[in-house]
Image: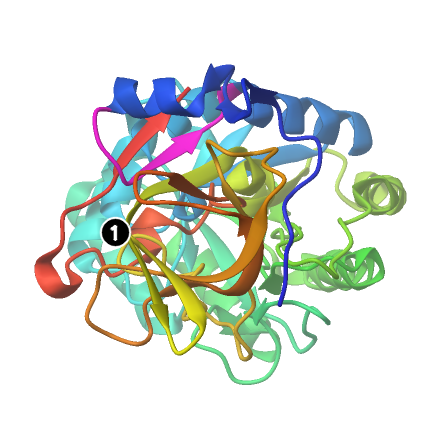
Amino acid sequence: MTTHTPQHQPCINNQLSIGGIELTRLVNRVGSTPFYAYDRQAIIKRMAELRQQMPPELKIHYALKANPMPAVVQLMAGLVDGFDVASAAEMKTALDTAMPVEHISIAGPGKRPAELSQAIAAGITINVESFNELETIAQLSAQTGITASVAIRINPAFELKSSGMKMGGGAKPFGIDEEQLPAVLRRVHALELDFQGFHIYSGSQNLKSEALIEAQQQSIALALRLLEFCPNGIKKLNIGGGYGIPYFANETPLNTQQVGDALAVQMDIVKVAQPNAELIIELGRYLVGEAGVYVCQVVDKKISRGQVYLVVNGGLHHHLAASGNFGQVIRKNYPIAIGNKMYAEQQETVNIVGSLCTPLDILADKILLPVAEVGDFVVVYQSGAYGLTASPTAFLSQPSAEEVLV
């Protein structure tokens, strides 16, 4: 039996308040459930706090893959220094904002020639993931007469320790192995492409400041070792992100102040070696994850051999991560509440399941919550990142979920 909800959640009339709107009113405003709601002020506050904790000259980019909802991206355009996209569709969303193209980059293995051509025409930086991709970029650049802007994504020999997903170290589909960099940089110079610098993304969802600090130090040291091979030096050094958020009861929030203090020391080292280089961190989940909730409604309540089941009108097809099928080895409950009964005294242990005909469709397992009935609203916290677009929305052809920024 587990119970865990984030502290200091604002409430109005015994209901969760999202963006200053009580839940049942927001449900009426949206018009149906399920839906995702993202709190505008929570995102703004997170960015303001992070700015205070990070070195003032550090550039903070938003990774659209965390949450590419256009309204969220438009908001982020006024808060961050750049965007990082992972597809042509995300690139279009980014280009629809006021973000200058020189502060937008695209990454990901297996970019299609059409995507590369679009990126070249747009003038955004392409993070090159392989020798073959580099040659394709050069060919497209020659065909269009537009000099492509490129950075080399490095697969470092080290990895980000204690990260939820490791994206660097060992054999990986991401980036070019660090030992191959001298050769690839010589080729970049020969092809006369507009070399911007490096992209090093070691891992994600990390709550250990010591691990992040070590990875950032290693990333910067690696980039500076490669300086002698760089055509025209380094203009931009993207050392990735990896800043995590707590999802489960035993997790402690990341000490970002400690990370920022250590990063300030590293920035001084970069300034000496490359005075005009921009140092960039690329964050997604950390900026928006805690600002979002997923809301669904109880449509049935049943007892099976002594266990209570709340059946809701959503599930894993909208929120794969909360079901435990998005990288969890041992399934754990996301923080959950009965959003219209925040302070009810009577509680019971329940299982919350979705509407799909599969035993994988579980939103909560043996969780202690206020007694809920048909018509009540189940709220899943920490849902602002890797929610709807990271889920199999077409599975069993169920209705989709709405998204709102409030």
**Which residue is at a point 68% across and 63% down the rendered structure image?**
226
**Which residue is at a point 59% across and 84% down the rendered structure image?**
170
Image coords of residue 39 (percent x, y)? 49, 25
Which residue type does callout 1 highlight?
Answer: Leu
Q: Look at the image and say whether residue 32 sits in the magenta stretch.
A: yes
Q: Look at the image and say whether residue 98 sits in the magenta stretch.
A: no
Relative to residue 170, is residue 138 depicted above or below? Answer: above
- Label 1 element class: helix
Pick whichever, 315 or 93, lies toward us: 315
Relative to residue 350, is residue 281 depicted above or below? Answer: above
Image coords of residue 253 (percent x, y)? 75, 49
The way the protein has been coloured in the rendering is rainbow
Read off the magenta span: 31-40
Pick whichever, 55 or 287, lies toward us: 287
Relative to residue 57, is residue 22 depicted above or below? Answer: above
Asked whether, in this view, residue 23 is left or right of residue 359, the answer is right
Label 1 environment density (alpha carbons within 10 Å; few <14, some 14–19, many ≥20):
many
Asked whether, in this view, residue 81 is left or right of residue 194, the answer is right
Q: Is residue 20 visible?
A: yes
Residue furthest top as drawn: 20
Viewport quadrant of the N terminus: bottom right
Image coords of residue 134 (percent x, y)? 35, 63
Image coords of residue 315 (percent x, y)? 31, 57
* Quarter occupied by residue 168: bottom right
Pick whichever, 193 or 212, lies toward us: 212
**Which residue is at a point 49% across and 24% down the rendered structure image?**
18
Pick whichever, 42 or 396, lies toward us: 396
Q: Which residue is mark 1?
A: 116
